[in-house]
Structure formats: structure tokens, C-alpha cells
Image (cartoon, rainbow, N blue to C red):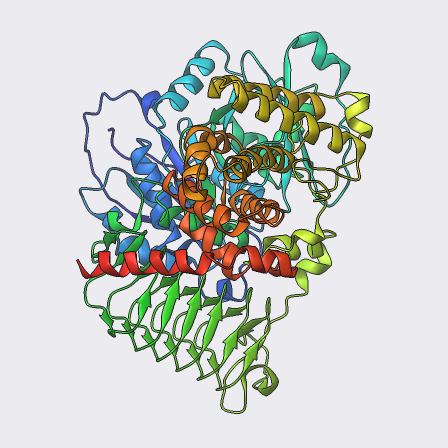
Amino acid sequence: MGPKKGGQAGGNKAKVGKQTAQQNAAPEETDQDERLQAIVLSDSYQTRFQPLTLETPRCLLPLCNTPLLEYTFEFLALAGVSEVIVVCCAHADQIQEYIANSRWSNPSSPFTIETVLSPESVSVGDAMRDLDAKGLITSDFLLVSGDIVCNVPFDKVLADHRQRRAKDKNAIMTMVLREASPFHRTRARAESAIFVLDEQTNQCVHYEEIKTRKHMKQISLDPEIFNKHTDLAIRNDFIDCHIDICSPDVPALFTENFDYNHIRKDFVHGILTSDLLGKTIFAHIVTDNYAARVRSLQTYDAVSKDVISRWTYPITPDSNLLADQTFQYQRGHIYKEDGIVLARSCRINSCTVVGAGTAVDDGTVITGSVIGRRCKIGKNVSIRSAYIWDDVTIEDDAIIESAIIANGAVIGASSHVAPGAIVSYNVKIDANIIVDGNKRLTKYLGEEDKKVDTDAVGEDGDGYVYEDASEAEEDDDYEEIVNSSGLVYNMASLNASDTSFSTVSADQAHRKSRRRRVSTASNNTIASEDSDEESFLREAQASVERAVAENHDLDIAALELSTLRMAKNAQFHEVRAATIAALIGRISHLINSNTLKARAAVESVLNRWGPLFRRQVFDQADQIDFLLLIQRDCTRRMQGSSILLHAINCLYDQDILEEEAILTWWYQDPQRKEDADMVKVGELVPRWLDWLTTAEEESDSE
């Protein structure tokens, strides 16, 4: 690793502050072209996390009790970066202080690090123009935000980029894209894009942002593209974390084009549509590793769950990224630090993180949540799918569901914080107060002089309702973003397809989106109001029934379903519905013919054919949809309650269903209780949930 090199800050508006982590760590003869710089954008230039980010930069918000910036630095270290430049805008002093006191400023740090203060920047484009003016970019660099979680091995990505650059200096950027289902929980709901790629080289020849609320039926491509590229893939099944390898030309291009503000919709779109620049951009598609960006409250929730569920391994809570962390992993994805005090009758259920110094009193139940350090949680408190940060006090009988409670907040006795709410720093909620869902409370006044909002926080409370009008005025799609980026995702506000663009044709462009309505009119068939959907469901169910009856190879059965889905342009929801109908129908036949008892019939069929669902169920939302479908199907079966119970147990053992998804389906999904038949068929499930909880408690005691 060569000595640190960088431009001078003199004469520029922005100031440069440096924390040197390594000096002369490698011989001077190291080839400068082999060094990898990284630019970390610490500011998101958005207001989605306000009022939290009024007091703390987004990159320092805690995710599973660790600042987001720590995950970004860990990724850069694993990627082999030798020099990191952190561009700071809002709260630059906090970021500089954090870096100065972190392990990344030690002599043993794998990279040097410096901060560039750019207080006048209001976009990524401004930040890039600042960097270009200072001449800090000396080699190819990795451009990331300070809010990413990624475990992608970077050797091949970097090698492919450098190989292209050696052949063609006009190959200025490689975008790292993670392949995922369109409804994957870490995908930003309100923001999606279409990438048109050359199938042979992965060169990106067209980029277009789409809004999920708008019924987009087709895209327009320049005919010249087809003259240069014979095989094209048109895709919108990527999670774009804005992880890019860029050449030193990129900052200069931002300087030359002052209307470039956004990295994708301005820069990438502008480069690809320019006839004069002649630059090329490529994609590297990741399929086996994890990459996500915490760009909204929705993705904050999703990435937190992925970290807890160890999808991000080795970046997990028990890797103890901070020097003073002492997390230990327990069965059920439970992580506890040293020094916590748990009353004998409290319950810490699965997918939960508890920080050091926290005390939990009798009768309290915590499920699928993150609890920070030094929190005091009273008696009979219920916390589910919530994020409680440091030094929070929650008094007796309070209920908190799918909410964020920031440092120093107090939740009064018998209060209820509804799903989607945010209680910011040091806000105090009085006893017996209901905080409505999606309401944001803060004590931050700025230059305003406001009185305590007693309607929101109570007579003895402290705080007021936060409302941000600036983004609503500037963004035509503000309502859509609010509905789809909160902790509780409002699917009803959007019209999104769960199929990926793969070809452009008139038939597909004008095909009506299918409704997800399933009829239960007959015993073994599924019908829909849409004739195309009805045709697919009938053929898909028959295909699975034939595979079971003739004992086909599992891969052949899956291939037939996949081919049929693509031919009919069907949704995975419909594939799951057809497969469930066929397999539960087979189970029911074995029971009704007295061939096998319920448990044996379920295990016989699902142990053999259950793995089909691995190719149909990709994330928690899919799992909940699957559970609702199987619950609905069981309502029309003899011994449906027993079939449902044993099916859940069997698929849980196969890791097709996760505990977190089962709990969310059972406790939170209103469709589960939509009619008496649905309620009745689930009457045995509480017994299984009790067994699961008991098993966890026995594991904890051991």
C-alpha cells in the first residue's frame, strides 16, 4: 500500500479534515493504478429519516445497535480499499468525531481515511464536483453511500472492471446490482428502475427510472441500440445499492454537466443517451451474496431483519464490530450482550437483539425487536418488531409495535405506540397515550418556538408532532414515497407487478395486470375472475398433480412450472397457489382414503415435494402470502386444522418458513382473521407456537 496522496484544499470553499490511519504501510513502488480509493457519501440529501436526522446524520443511526457507517467501513475493508474519503455535509462535526475515535483511525486500520467537508452540497452531483475541484481522485474509486450493508467479495468485480478499462478507457463505470425478486423486502418500494443490458457483456445500454404507482406498459429504445447489440436483457429485478466502481473521469463529467445531480437518473441516463461523450457503463450482477442500502424506513426495517437472520454473514451482531460490544448468539436468532438483567417471567422471543445494561421486568414479552443499551423496560410490556435505541425508558403495560423509539425517550405506563410511529430523541410520552401509526414526534425545535403538543404526548409529556413540508413541495411523488417507505408498508397505495421485464412485445405491453383473487368453489381446483389467470392456475395445478402421480424428478417438475409461468406471464403468487392446491389436495386424498393419518400424510408429501416452494418463496412477504394461501386452502379440507398445523411444522423444519414470518402472519396479518373459516382452521396453531416458545426458553436456560 503506497503512501497517502491527495490534492490541496487551499482556495476551495470546502474544508478538508484528515484522520490518518496508516502511514507508509507499503513500499513506495506500489503501482498507483492497483490502489483502490473509496468515496463515501455520508449524506443522503433526503429527509426520509427526519426528525431523527435533524439531530444525527443518517450514517450514524444505529442498525442492530451499530452505526450504519460501521457496516460501510467493514465492507470497504473486505473489498481491499486502501484509501477512504468521506464527504460530509450535515452534522459533519459528529461524523469527524466518530471517525477520530473509531478503530479505523488506528495504525492497524486497513486503509487511510480523511473527511472532506462540503456544507454547500445539496446533491451527489455537488459532492462529485467538489471532489473534482480538489483533485483528490487519483485512481479508479469505489463510490458508495454511508448506509450500505454488503458482504460481496470484490476481487472479481474489481478485476473485471480493470480488464475492461485496460481494453477500453471509455468504460468509465461498473454498477454492482443484486439480483432479487421484485417484492424482496430490501428493495425500495417506491423506487425501481429498468436496466437494459447486453447479455454477452453486461454493458448497460439503457437506464430508465419507473414509478411503481404509474402503470408502465412499455419503454422506448433507440433503434440504433439493436444495430450494436443483438442480444438484450430488459430487467427490473435488481436491488440497486448504488455501489459503483468509477474511473477518475466520472467527477470531471459531473463538472462538465452542471445539471447532473443524481447518480442514476441524471448521470447514468445522461451518459447512455449522449451521442457525443462515447462513454460506456457496465453492470456486475450479484446472485449469491448480500447487498442492501438503508435508504428509507422500510429498508431500515428490512435490512435489520436480514442482519439478525444472518443473511449478511459474517457481518452479524455477534461479530461485534465495535470494540466494546459483547454480543453472543443464541438459538432462534437471539443476541444478548453482557450485563443485561432479565426478570424470571419475561420472555425474549426469536429474532431479538438486547444491548448491554438493559433491564427487563416481569411479564414483558419482546419479539423480533432490537433493544439498545441501558434501557429500562417495565412490567407487562409488549414490544413487537420495534427498534428501541439507547437509554430508553418504557413503563409498565406499554405496547410498542413496529416503531422506532430514539435515545433517551420515555414511554409512559399503558401507552400504545402504533405501527409506523417514530418517537425521536428525548421525547416523553405521558401515561395512557396512543401514538398513532406513522406519526413522528420530536423535541427538536431548530429556530422555531413551539409549545408542547399535549394532544400528542399528554399533559406531562414533552414533544410535538413533526411535519416536513419541504419534500412534499419539491417531489410530485411524495405521497407515494411516504406510503411505501415507512416502517409499515402500505401496499394498497401502489400498483406494482411482481414479474420482471424480460422482453418488449405488444401483447405483454397491453396485458392487464391480474388480480390476486382466489375462489374456493371446488374441492381441488382454483378459479379466478380473469380467464388468463384461470387458465394458468388450472394448467399449473395439473402439472404438479401429474408430477406427484408419476413421481417425476423434482427439478423437472420445477422446470415445467417455470416454463409455464413465463409462457403465461404469471405471478409467483399464482404459482404458489397452484402448487399448494395440488399438494394439499394430495395430502387430503391420502387422509380421506384412510391411507395415512394426517401427520404422516403431510410429511410424506411435503418431505418429497416441499422443496418446490424454495423456488417460489423468496422473502418474508412471500412466506406470509404462502401461509395465507395454505390457510385458505385448508378451510375446504376435511381435517384442515391438522393439515395446516403439520404443514407449518414440516416446512419450518425444512427452513422454507422462518419463525419471524410465521409470527408476523399469526399476530399481525388481518387477512388471517378475515372470516370464521380462516379462524377455525387455525385453531391448532397456538399449540405449535407455545411449543416453539417453550423450546426457545429451554434453549436459553441451557
The foreground one among 129 and 148 is 148
Query: Where in the figure is residue 694, as x and y percent of width and height?
Result: 30, 60
Residue 414 is situated, as x and y percent measured from the top left of the image, at: 47, 83
Is residue 558 visible in the rendered structure shown here?
Answer: no
- 479 above or below 227? below
Quadrant where the N terminus lies? top left
Q: Is residue 630 visible?
A: yes
Compared across the picture, whether 337 is left or right of 442 comes to: left
Residue in the picture at 74% in, 21% down: 504
Q: Residue at x 44, y 63 (%)?
A: 56
Q: What is the number of callouts on the image? A: 0
547 above or below 623? Answer: above
Give residue 486's quadrant in the image: bottom right
Against 382, is 168 above or below?
above
Instruction: Please provide percent x and percent y for residue 547.
Output: 54, 21
Q: Nearer the viewer, residue 127 or 652?
A: 652
Q: Residue at x 43, y 77 (%)?
A: 426
Quadrant the C terminus occupies: bottom left
The answer to which of 529 and 250 lies nearer the viewer is: 529
Residue at the limit of the structure toward the front, as seen here: 594
Measuring from the top left, give residue 612's x and y in whole percent.
Answer: 49, 29
Query: In which quarter of the view is residue 107 placed?
Result: top left
